């Protein structure tokens, strides 16, 4: 007995020792790639000394004797902190993820190969201005200097992830940066998926009013009636089943709800308490760890520039200099059109055009797959753009037999000068110069909010397609590709882009709301990203005669839901105070208590309150009951509450209350009936997931911000180290937007929001502030992996200063690069 016990002790001790050794080895290997910020290094590719001063938040302040050297320093700093992120994005846009991740990413690679974004980026390098090519070349040299240092000094392959995926790291090229900007265009484009969804809904709901209910137009001047999709494209099955949707976080193709958002606004001196202009910007993207954004300061020949970059792109994309501030918001420009192309029945290698049948442009492409046989694809292009298979974007559900689908998209330009525009914008010294520089933007289309010392402006940048006035669907539905009136005729002149310079009211702003109402084809878009946040923004802006930096911060962090304030009186009109007393502990008593809580709530989506969770569960259940019997499986696509739809139904606009009657039941249900049933559904769901004590519910428990690692985030044990989860306030329709996932099992997880926040005050530029949602480092062992995330979660900021002495005062390291 004693002998057996001794052996058990020895075995246990051995296992513990072995585990400790394994952990120590793993930690040693992973920590080798932690960058040393205090060092001097001799490198090729610079003409003079480059100094990278990292302030107390690990924001690099980069100084050099010439602008190309400064871009070299930015490339080096990006590669120090975000090399894995950069290489993953490059592989994504190249369609080469499967070489690392195997069959998991084959469909993603197929889509990117068909879009041909990387070859188009290679061709676009030649279209850039000479000084921009020099900047791209120097930036690439800086990235490659870091890669060479890693290889020479055995610095843990540059990031812990490279130990698990040991593919070679090719040198960075100027085209790689252009390609990543094109990848951002894909992530921010949602009109393709919106066209497919509208077409599928049209097949199920041929009644025009019903279609206008579930896919409502933003209120304003009316839109001319459209034909239903079946009349445009005959022989389409009305009830085609879609393939399961990919939820892979590596997939850059976004549904319309996740295709970018943002807030941006500015105040002129006459609306500022300090007499200087103010600007606030918080672009919204999918949350990830590390953040998409990386803070940096570049000391250029024209002066210092500070703000947010995206690793891989040598430009401050939202930020300020001493003379100019700029912010970006998604414009929702309709820059994509789907075409239904008819195949030649006699020769499937040809498609129909206005002048007869024509051969596809074709090219072979090989996808190499880890541990699998490679796949050879045939890429096909039409005059309208690349051919996409039915397996992407649910295109099979809207494509009739004997046809294929092609895509027209402004980002598919082989002479995309958007990088030139982005770099020239940093050198602009005034609003007028910024507008002039922005003419070169092609894609992604954005709204630029601008402020210099005297002027504020908002201008939409990016190429506007020139459509024929006789276009069959006005770009809202897929159309026949061989009809001349459905084809694009180049781009509109830059002067046609909406712009608002020095408005009389002194304030400009955008929350992805409808910008302008113009007749087709000068319409900009029929699909907009917001109809709710703009109402709260208008109230906050007009509620003060003058604003300050702090009032702009207050608006940026505002969590009051205008949507909740609008919908609750409608859906609860027949429920408030109308039920009889019920014993404690019964479902009826819980319903009464829920209604009492909501009746006293002001609509603030605060993480510590129970009311936001009760409200969110109720309206989600209500929309599900309203649409499920009419749309069947297509209802799964409407996984976010559409406030305008519910408002139309409960106000019975154009007979919209018909949605309340359940088709498959004998009784005729009223909207009050469905509202009552939906509240029951919500309370059951809350009890199953969060318990029955309503007062103990917390919105933040359900509305966690999910900054997850896209590759290691689902790996047991590792996910504890690489994922960053934070309880957050806000919601789908608040200015501090936290878009929910919409899908089970965690439909209220916060998955998309402001990864960057900045507020710029030109009365005292160095009092400006900014922050990102994680940290500067992409290395999970670094203390800078999530340090800024704690400030972001609490609504705090760090100084956005160009004061060199302030940066040096508490620097975490100074790197000096000298010519070889």
Image (cartoon, rainbow, N blue to C red):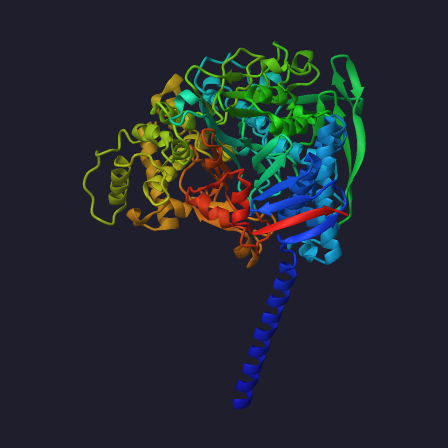
As drawn, the residue found furthest toward the left would be 581
Res 571 quadrant in image = top left
Identify which residue, 784 or 14, lies in the foreground.
Answer: 784
Using residue 457 as the reference point, say whether residue 115 is left or right of it: right
Q: Give me the residue at 40% from left, 27% from top.
A: 274
Image vertical order of residue 296 relative to residue 356, above or below: below
Q: Give me the residue at 53% from left, 10% from top.
A: 519
Could you say where residue 276 lies in the image, as x and y percent from the top left? 44, 26
Res 819 quadrant in image = top right
Residue 99 shows up from this direction: no
User: How many discs appear?
Assistant: 0
As drawn, the residue found furthest toward the bottom would be 2
Using residue 762 as the reference point, say whether residue 83 is left or right of it: right
Identify which residue, 612 or 444, lies in the foreground.
Answer: 444
Could you say where residue 175 lies in the image, as x and y percent from the top left? 73, 35
Could you say where residue 237 lies in the image, as x and y percent from the top left? 60, 26
Residue 439 shows up from this direction: yes
Identify which residue, 268 or 756, lies in the foreground.
Answer: 268
Using residue 364 as the reference point, say whether residue 35 is left or right of it: left
Image vertical order of residue 784 relative to residue 231, above or below: below
Could you say where residue 584 lies in the image, as x and y percent from the top left? 22, 48
Q: Give me the residue at 71% from left, 28% from top.
A: 387
Identify which residue, 318 or 539, lies in the foreground.
Answer: 318
Image vertical order of residue 714 relative to residue 758, above or below: below
Image vertical order of residue 320 relative to residue 3, above or below: above
């Amino acid at each position: 007995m004693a002998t057996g016990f001794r052996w058990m002790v020895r075995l246990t001790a051995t296992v513990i020792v072995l585990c400790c050794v394994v952990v120590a080895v793993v930690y040693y290997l992973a920590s080798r790639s932690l960058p040393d910020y205090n060092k001097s290094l001799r490198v090729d590719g610079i003409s003079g000394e480059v100094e990278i001063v990292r302030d107390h938040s690990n924001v690099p302040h980069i100084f050099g004797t010439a602008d190309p050297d400064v871009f070299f320093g930015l490339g080096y700093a990006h590669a120090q902190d975000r090399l894995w992120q950069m290489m993953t994005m490059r592989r994504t846009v190249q369609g080469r993820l499967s070489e690392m991740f195997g069959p998991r990413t084959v469909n993603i690679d197929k889509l990117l190969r068909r879009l041909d974004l990387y070859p188009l980026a290679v061709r676009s390098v030649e279209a850039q201005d000479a000084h921009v090519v020099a900047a791209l070349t120097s930036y690439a040299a800086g990235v490659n200097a870091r890669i060479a240092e890693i290889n020479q000094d055995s610095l843990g392959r540059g990031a812990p992830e490279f130990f698990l995926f040991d593919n070679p790291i090719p040198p960075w090229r100027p085209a790689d940066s252009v390609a990543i900007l094109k990848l951002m265009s894909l992530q921010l484009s949602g009109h393709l998926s919106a066209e497919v969804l509208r077409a599928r809904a049209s097949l199920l709901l041929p009644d025009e009013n019903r279609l206008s209910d579930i896919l409502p137009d933003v209120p304003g001047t009316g839109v001319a009636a459209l034909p239903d999709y079946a009349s445009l494209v005959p022989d389409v099955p009305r009830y085609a089943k879609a393939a399961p949707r990919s939820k892979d976080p590596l997939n850059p193709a976004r549904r319309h709800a996740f295709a970018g958002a943002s807030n941006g606004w500015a105040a002129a001196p006459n609306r500022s308490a300090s007499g200087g202009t103010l600007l606030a910007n918080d672009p919204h993207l999918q949350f990830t760890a590390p953040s998409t954004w990386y803070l940096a300061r570049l000391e250029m020949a024209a002066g210092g520039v500070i703000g947010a970059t995206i690793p891989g792109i040598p430009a401050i994309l939202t930020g300020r200099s001493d003379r100019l501030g700029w912010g970006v918001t998604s414009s929702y420009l309709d820059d994509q059109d789907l075409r239904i192309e008819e195949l030649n029945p006699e020769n499937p290698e040809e498609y129909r055009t206005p002048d007869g049948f024509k051969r596809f442009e074709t090219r072979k492409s090989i996808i190499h797959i880890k541990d699998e046989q490679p796949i050879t694809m045939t890429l096909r292009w039409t005059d309208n753009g690349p051919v996409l298979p039915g397996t992407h974007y649910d295109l099979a559900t809207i494509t009739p037999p004997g046809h294929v689908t092609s895509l027209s998209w402004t980002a598919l330009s082989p002479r995309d000068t958007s990088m030139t525009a982005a770099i020239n914008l940093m050198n602009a010294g005034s609003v007028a110069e910024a507008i002039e520089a922005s003419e070169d933007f092609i894609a992604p289309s954005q709204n630029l909010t601008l402020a210099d010392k005297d002027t504020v402006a908002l201008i939409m940048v990016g190429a506007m397609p020139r459509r024929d006035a006789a276009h069959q669907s006005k770009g809202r539905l897929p159309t026949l590709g061989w009809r001349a009136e459905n084809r694009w005729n180049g781009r509109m002149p830059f002067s046609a882009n909406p712009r608002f310079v020095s408005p009389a009211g002194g304030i400009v702003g955008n929350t992805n709301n409808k910008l302008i109402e113009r007749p087709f084809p000068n319409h900009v878009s029929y699909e907009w990203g917001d109809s709710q946040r703009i109402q709260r923004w208008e109230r906050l802006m007009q509620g003060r005669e003058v604003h300050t930096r702090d009032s702009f911060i207050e608006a940026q962090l505002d969590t009051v839901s205008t949507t909740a304030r609008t919908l609750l009186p409608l859906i609860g009109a027949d429920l408030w105070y109308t039920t009889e007393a019920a014993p404690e502990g019964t479902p009826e008593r819980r319903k009464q208590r829920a209604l009492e809580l909501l009746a006293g709530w002001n609509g603030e989506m605060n993480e510590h309150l129970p009311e936001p969770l009760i409200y969110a569960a109720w309206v989600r259940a209500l929309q599900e009951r309203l649409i499920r019997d009419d749309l069947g499986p297509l209802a799964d696509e409407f996984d976010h509450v559409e406030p305008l739809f519910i408002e139309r139904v409960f106000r019975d606009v154009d007979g919209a209350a018909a949605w309340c009657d359940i088709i498959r039941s004998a009784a005729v249900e009223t909207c009050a009936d469905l509202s009552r049933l939906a509240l029951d559904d919500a309370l059951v769901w809350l009890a199953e997931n969060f318990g029955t004590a309503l007062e103990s519910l917390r919105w933040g428990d359900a509305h966690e911000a999910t900054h997850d690692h896209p590759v290691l985030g689902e790996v047991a044990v590792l996910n504890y180290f690489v994922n960053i989860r934070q309880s957050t306030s806000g919601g789908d329709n608040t200015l501090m937007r936290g878009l929910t996932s919409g899908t089970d099992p965690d439909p209220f997880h916060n998955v998309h929001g402001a990864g960057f926040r900045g507020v710029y005050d030109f009365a005292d530029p160095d009092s400006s502030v900014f922050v990102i949602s994680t940290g500067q480092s992409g290395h999970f062992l670094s203390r800078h992996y999530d340090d800024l995330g704690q400030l972001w979660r609490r609504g705090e900021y760090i100084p956005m200063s160009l004061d060199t002495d302030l940066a040096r005062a508490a620097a975490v390291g100074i790197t000096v690069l000298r010519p070889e």
